[in-house]
């Protein structure tokens, strides 16, 4: 008998029929004698609708009210799933984040889990019940409802698995595992049997939304056995493992390709080349809580520099306003803003021990006449910023150049 935490995403609970399907899957595991804690997302589209309604009312709704609103999506699903379970004779009980007591900090809309009280859950499990928990939400010390950021139900699942020391955390979604890249963009993408926590963390933070970044962080930190599977078909899925556990296998040089359209590129041209300039530019940007991603500085003519960087697209206007002001103060020539960019990244732990990956990447893009605007690298990834309209072509070209459709 094992204790399994299962998480079902929005598409998997997207209709009453699909909720019934989830109940039947749960029944199968119960019949094998396992104890189950089930985390669910809001039905697909619900969270987006709630966000849209809020923005119809207010340009910048209060984050506290936003969380009260968004948490209702998951609250609907837990009740419906418990009803579907009761229908087939399975005793079940639903809990909101606050009822479990998933305690978080008070950073509304992007709260972090601080602790989880497992007392209610354990009692129910011991009484033979399936426990159904609302994903994506928690409660702060003062009793305010919080949410964990978009895609946060993954994190609820993994955090519960860690707190309960579950034997496995299974993330059920609308694809049957983690692929070499988004299978919706590259049909030849291949499902991976295994991927390391480190690579999964990079892929998630570089745009692959199949797992929320924080869920992977949690799984790595607490060594939670984590698997991504399909809700709609049977199969082994993808196991996320530590590098040590994977060391028996030859690590592929490149495991996957991630991409994002979520960025805007800003440049400040002809800034005087004197000490402290970067600080004068980025100080106000960081004070405004804007996250900066790639930064490149070019030495220009006449002792001036160009500084170029990217921010999340949602921060475009705020960043542009700040930069215009800074440009005036510094006597820079001009500010340029381009939100038609995208970032493509190659990820693989095998990169550490192989040279020539970057040049092969640049060659593959050049062969498609795709211009690289910015480049950034770390030990296990290389990212390039390109014109957005070439994104899909670039991902397909790289997938093929690195032979990702065939097992290493
Ligand atoms: P859920 O609602 O179940 O949480 P998500 O939509 O958040 O599902 O995540 C699953 C989606 O992630 C897939 O439908 C797929 O389009 C996308 N995706 C992006 N990159 C990958 C990848 N490397 N492997 C698998 N899926 C990916
Ligand atoms: N319902 C939330 C979202 O759409 C959380 C989740 O699905 O994981 O982002
Ligand atoms: Mg998700």
Image (cartoon, rainbow, N blue to C red):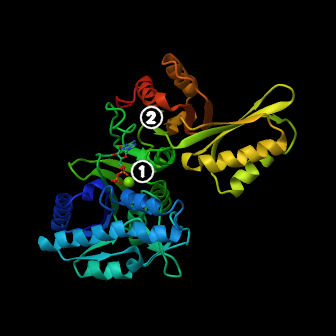
The residue beneath circle 1 is 241
Check disc 2 and report the residue beneath it.
252
SS type, badge 1? strand
Residue at the image point whose x is 55% and y is 42% from the top: 263
- On screen, residue 303 versus residue 201, left or right, reads right
Pinpoint residue 368: horizontal percent, then vertical percent.
48, 19
On screen, 120 above or below 215? below
Residue 138, image x, y percentages: 45, 72
Q: Quadrant of residue 398?
A: top left
Quick one: 108 or 317, which is closer to the camera? 317
- Between 396 and 142, the residue placed more toward the observer is 142
Q: Position of residue 376 (x, y in %)?
A: 62, 36
Point out the image quarter for the N terminus. Answer: bottom left
User: Dot 1: few (<14), some (14–19), or many (≥20) neighbours within 10 Å?
Assistant: many
Mark 1: is the Cβ under 8 angstroms from ligand 1? no
- In the image, residue 199 sits, relative to residue 218, either above or below, namely above
């Amino acid at each position: 008998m094992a204790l399994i935490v299962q998480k079902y995403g929005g598409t998997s609970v997207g209709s009453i029929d699909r909720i019934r399907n989830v109940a039947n899957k749960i029944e199968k595991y119960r019949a094998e004698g396992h104890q189950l804690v089930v985390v669910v997302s809001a039905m697909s589209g619900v969270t987006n609708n709630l966000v849209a309604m809020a923005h119809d009312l207010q340009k910048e709704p209060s984050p506290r009210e936003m969380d009260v609103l968004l948490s209702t999506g998951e609250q609907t699903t837990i009740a419906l799933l418990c009803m579907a379970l009761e229908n087939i004779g399975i005793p079940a009980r639903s809990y909101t984040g606050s009822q479990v007591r998933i305690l978080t900090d008070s950073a509304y809309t992007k709260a972090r889990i601080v602790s989880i009280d497992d007392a209610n859950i354990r009692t129910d499990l011991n009484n033979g019940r399936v426990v159904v928990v609302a994903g994506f939400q928690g409660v702060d010390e003062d009793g305010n409802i919080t949410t964990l950021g978009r895609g946060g139900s993954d994190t609820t699942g993994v955090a519960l698995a860690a707190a309960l020391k579950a034997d496995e955390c299974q993330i059920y979604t609308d694809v049957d595992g983690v692929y070499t890249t988004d299978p919706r963009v590259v049909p030849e993408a291949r499902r991976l049997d295994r991927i390391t926590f480190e690579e999964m963390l990079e892929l998630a933070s570089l745009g692959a939304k199949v797992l929320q970044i924080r869920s992977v962080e949690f799984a790595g930190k607490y060594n939670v056995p984590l698997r991504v599977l399909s809700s709609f078909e049977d199969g082994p899925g993808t196991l996320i493992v530590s590098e040590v556990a994977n060391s028996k296998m030859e690590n592929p040089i490149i495991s996957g390709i991630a991409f994002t359209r979520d960025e805007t590129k800003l440049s400040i041209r002809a800034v005087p080349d004197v000490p402290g300039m970067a600080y004068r530019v980025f100080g106000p940007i960081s004070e405004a809580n804007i996250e900066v991603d790639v930064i490149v500085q070019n030495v220009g003519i006449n002792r001036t520099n160009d500084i170029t960087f990217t921010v999340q697209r949602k921060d475009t206007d705020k960043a542009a306003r700040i930069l215009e002001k800074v440009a005036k103060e510094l006597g820079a020539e001009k500010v340029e803003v381009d939100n038609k960019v995208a970032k493509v990244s190659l990820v693989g732990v095998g990169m550490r021990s192989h040279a020539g990956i970057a040049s092969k990447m640049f060659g593959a893009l050049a062969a498609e006449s795709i211009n690289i605007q910015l480049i950034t690298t770390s030990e296990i990834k290389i990212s390039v910023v390109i014109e957005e309209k070439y994104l899909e072509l670039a991902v397909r070209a790289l997938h093929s150049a690195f032979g990702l459709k065939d097992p290493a």
